[in-house]
Image (spheres, rainbow, N blue to C red):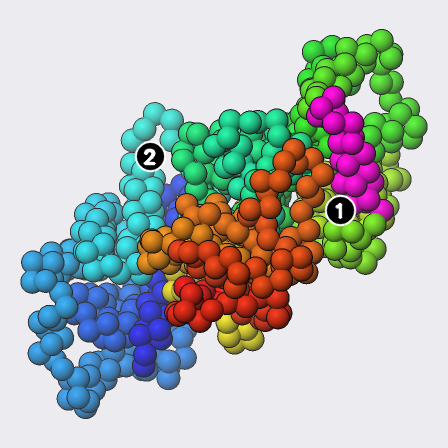
Amino acid sequence: MNNYMAVALGLTAQGLFAGRFVVQLLQSEKSNRVESPTLFWQLSLFASFLLLIYGVLRNDIVIAGGQLIGFLIYIRNLQLKGNWEKIPEFVRILTFFLPSVLLWFMVFGSNFDWEKFIANPEIDSLLLTWGTFGQVLFTSRFVVQWLYSEKLNESLFPVTFWYISIIGSVMIAVYAIFRKDAVLFIGQAFGLLVYGRNLFIHHMPLLNNPTTLLSKFTKYRLSMLLVFMGMILFFNLGNWGVTESSEARYAQISKEMLESGDYFHPTLMGIYHYHKPPLTYWITALSYKLFGISSWSARFFLQIAILMQIWLVYKIGKLLYNNRQVATYAAFIYSSFFILIISGRALTTDAYLSLSTLAAMYAWFLYLKNDRQSHLLVFYLMLGLGFFIKGPVILVVPLAVILFQKYVQKVPLGSFISHLPGMLIFLFTGLGWFVYLYTENPEFLDYFFFNHTVQRFSTNNFSRSQPFWFYGVLVISSSFPWLLVLLSKIKSLWRNKADSTLMLLAWIFIPLVFFSISQSKLVLYILPIYPAIALSAAWVWQHLPIRSQLFWDRVQLGFHLLVILALAFIPIFEPQIVLSYKFYFILIISTSVLVSIQFIAMKSAERTVFAAVFFLAGITASSTYFMGNNAKLINDQQNIAAFIQQQLTEKENILVYDKRLPSIEFLTTKNIISLYDGSEDLNRETQFEEDENWRKNLINLKENKYWLNRVNPSKSVLMIKKNKMPTDQLKWDEKVFSNQIEIDGWILLY
């Protein structure tokens, strides 16, 4: 069995070990005392057998030896609980004798090097002693548990069990660090949380005001959700470089802005780039100033924006429904949307636009409730900031909601005079930059509003066309099952005139139709409608019968497991995809948690929303390893840049054939020269350039035939996409580029 299979066994075992403690802890929380569930021992038995095999394959006596005693203790606990005899006799015999047979075969029936097994030269003797002692101590906790249970003739956990667990877990975690064994380390780190919580539960009766974790979670659940989501969002955030094309473009523009000190005239690779207002660039440049220039810092404030959105969804839910439970469900549901996480994985304007939309709507609802002028001013300020982020698109959701309120729900919106100061704030905040550039060059107004707003909506000039139904399918699949839950009750909502929920339906469907009509479609364009899906679905969910909640809970679980299964086996269908054992380990942990909580007596309403967040957290964490290991598939040039920076230090220029690659300029200190040979990607908009300096770094091979052969720039490396063969326009002397290497789908000649 190869090393990958061994690691897979170890990961599966640790996932099951983690799952058993999820079962044990949740059952203990429910009864408010330390429990010993049957499922805990069943999972322990199976996981122990897998980890025994893993230890043998790893040639590690510390791991394998630690499972032998525990294996029999798990069986004994099942006997004490009266569940061992319920297992079929054949399985019981096989389970009881298989470890012994395995060890017998390992020593006598194969060519296994037992001497090496006892004295593994790969492990330092001091480290082996430390790890062995830690494993013996860790294993002894179950001996203590077994003796305690035998004394009382009942399967129970003594308090000593948890103290020994903590000490042994710390020792094994240290051993795992030195052994560079992620399987062991992650498993022990997870266990420490459980051991500590069980100690707290054990000692709760001694406290004046004993409470359970779930009851405390009820009070602090929003804060805990934000902390948990923050940990997930920032986990491995810099594990991949800026990706082409959008993220690399935004990241490089912000870098050039910081380096030049000109914050009003964005440039991309030395050429003015006025596609978007500069607020996103300003935010990113601030992050660079605080944390340095990197892919991590480029994405830093996106994660903050997502956390603020979750908080605002909760606040809006509480304001609209005056119900903390509905607001909490809405925050959890919104946190479980894939599209929200996608908006923070690569730098674009969409997360900031959605934040400004939510902030504006929260201020608007406060104004309608309290009739305070300050709230109205904040509403217009947020609209202005949204305009300064992405232009007129900020108005789509607010206008849809306000027009629905005015003409359908007959809500009084206030006089024109009361809105006038806010409108002035909006004009100053949102249009100030546009007016400034217009005074410099009147052509700018036509360029931005006609070329990059009207044409983006009405034509396919930007090659982003999708069929009309594209967003409909996307929103159903990316919010599954919550939009379907909402639609299942839409008739009763309309019949009962549920004002707040009907308004939220307008928030969803009017912009959805608007964006579906548009000829330019990208996934994140419809991000601002998802808060309304979460809010309205949360209200419907709160009022669903338990039977319906159980149905949707099962549907969601099936969907989650199907997605995890598809991700696990995707390399079979796409061999280019590389998935590490860390990716699989997180998937296994996620599966263990999702399945385990199904066996715990929880309210179906709470279990479903909790499971949705846990599932998304697992997918998000595992995806960081996917991104880091598949640079070619995600258009990440990090490996190429690292090779040039580290191995070709004497090179001064990077020549990129027929492709605009701002990521290379972002990731290196070299001079980038783009060689245009017909690609639309390099049709730069140079009408605002004041001189011809930009031509030094953008060579038109159509006009300068055989430029490379004539100019022959010294100290250069040439990059050519593997599947894009050069035309006759690109010729070079073989003496200039005598070496070549392929990295992530690019040919580097040097």
Residue at image point 14% right, 68% down: 122
Q: Which one is nearer the viewer's eye here, 532 or 647? A: 647
Residue at image point 19% right, 90% down: 109
Q: Which one is nearer the viewer's eye here, 647 or 616? A: 647
Q: Amino acid at mark 2?
A: Met
Residue 457 covered by magenta stretch: yes
Residue at image point 52% right, 36% down: 256
Q: CA distance from mark 1 to mark 2?
A: 41 Å
Which image quadrant for residue 415? top right
Circle nearer the N terminus (1, 2): 2
Q: Amino acid at mark 1?
A: Leu
Q: Where is residue 40 drawn, in percent x and y? A: 37, 59
Is 421 located above or below residue 719 in the figure? above
Residue at image point 78% right, 57% down: 466
The residue wearing badge 2 is: 204
Which image quadrant for residue 97? bottom left
Residue 733 covered by magenta stretch: no
Q: Where is residue 682 drawn, in percent x and y? A: 64, 53
Q: Where is residue 225 drawn, in percent x and y? A: 50, 37
Is 317 located above or below residue 94 in the figure? above
Question: Principal SS element in the magenta part?
Answer: helix
Q: Is residue 384 visible?
A: no
Identify the magenta region. Answer: 437-458
Indicate the quadrant containing the N terminus: top left, top right, bottom left or bottom right.
bottom left
The residue wearing badge 1 is: 486
Indicate the quadrant containing the C terminus: top left, top right, bottom left or bottom right.
bottom left
Q: Which one is nearer the viewer's eye here, 357 or 190? A: 357
